Amino acid sequence: MNMSRVLRLWWPLATSWLLMAVELPLLAAVVGRLPDERIHLAAYGSIVFPVSLVIEGPVIMLLAASTALCSHWDAYRKVFRFMMALCGGLTLVHAAVAFTPLFDWVARDIMGAPEEVLEPARLGLAIMTPWTWAIGYRRFQQGILIRNEQGRAVTMGTLTRLAANSTTLLLLAGFTDAPGIVVGSSAIAVGVCTEALYIGWRVRPVIEQRVRPAPASGEPLHLRSFLAFYLPLALTPLITLLIQPIGAASMARMPASLTSLAAWPAVHGLVFITRSLGMAYNEVVVTLLGQPGAVAALRRFGRLLGAATVLALALLAATPLSELWFGRISDLDDELVAACRLAIGLAVLMPGYAALQSWFQGSLVKARSTRPVTEAVLLYFALSAVLLQVGVARAPADGGRFVIGGVALSGIHWALSSFVIAGVCQTAWLWWRSRPVLRRFAEDEVSS
């Protein structure tokens, strides 16, 4: 195992993540040029996107599960049936929130969203109903492709998604009078459904030629053993994603709430672009760890990746590139540009610890020791929630901004600082809990 082998598997997955990460800034750029852009950006960023993410949370780790477990036909069939049942149930949950009075309870009573964004958000959430099933099916089948080192098919799927997304954005924005929330939500929904169909088509020959003929190996996969493996994994993104609406609800109660909520999609999208390079590394670790020389090569690659992504975001924050991105490309007004620029400066460590988390977490998944992953994310959730609540409690009663060290901060800056502190602590916990696992993999390499 050497760095070039790691790079060959990582770069198609990273390209896929990068292309996927372009979606939110692209949406912000188009919707930002339509009437009432603040309201529609806030509706999508504070309700539609975070609520959709929370509902789909349990399906996210189907990618890791199929990469780790689906080595033969019997395992594939069992995990596929589980995936379909899970996606169907969660789609019903999404529809219940979007089309019933549950929406008012979630958006107004729990999240405390501003009144002016409620109706646009209700419409956007209804349009996003196919999201969960499309994401779950796609991630499950992508795991099969990655396990068989077919990363380029994953990249092509994401290109297909981005093409469908961009086409829908341009057609609706350019040739209809649809409001921004309809334009943005429709583009995202069309994109994920198109990608799911493409990946389903590309995975068929891999299943027929590699998965079906493969002999069953290891212990048979039973529901109890699968749930013991998967439930801690499923809780991980679900708990992490719960922080998104909690963060949005907190920003709605902090200084400059509408500015913070309107800036959030653009900031989150840009930070996600840099973080996605590290997030793509998780499945690389799961696929390659256990092979001769893998521990040293994967550790070195993860460290270099983390350092490079931190440097990239720091350059964006400290140079006029941030004004180019938020002002020229995203077409945000001067107040939003200033808020966004400070926000990405506060988020500069996020891409670095994303790469390290993938290294530590991937080793735990490979060893089928998933409980520490949940422990780490519970720590992240608890710290984030406490720090966000402190921000709400400290919000000036007169509606003024936080002033820390002579710098005036709005809600988005407090929220991002909370996420960074919690994320660093989560990474430290994963490092500590993964040490025995990585030591065991290193010893196995020596003995073999």
Image (cartoon, rainbow, N blue to C red):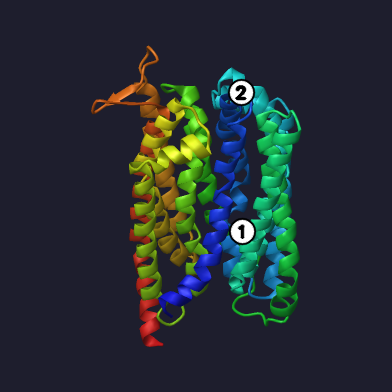
> Is 198 or 176 nearer to us in this picture?
176
Q: Is residue 258 left or right of residue 178?
A: left
Residue 133 vertical placement versus 325 (above, below): below
Which residue is at 68% across, 47% downward? Answer: 165
Residue 337 sits in quarter: top left
Image quarter (top left, top right, bottom left or bottom right) of the C terminus = bottom left
Image quarter (top left, top right, bottom left or bottom right) of the N terminus = bottom left
Which of the two labelled residues, at mark 1 and mark 2, occupies the earlier sequence position?
Answer: 2
Residue 111 sits in quarter: top right
Which residue is at 59% across, 24% downward? Answer: 39
Which residue is at 41% across, 34% downward? Answer: 415
Comparing labels 1 and 2, the label whose residue is closer to the camera: 2
Secondary structure category for the residue under label 1: helix
User: Residue under circle 2?
Assistant: 36
Secondary structure category for the residue under label 2: loop
Question: Where does residue 164 sit, x and y in percent of width and height?
Answer: 71, 50
Tell me the number on the disc at residue 237.
Answer: none
Tell me the number on the disc at residue 62.
Answer: 1
Q: Residue type at mark 1?
A: Leu
Question: Where does residue 320 sit, x and y in percent of width and height?
Answer: 37, 41
Q: Is residue 123 left or right of residue 31?
A: right
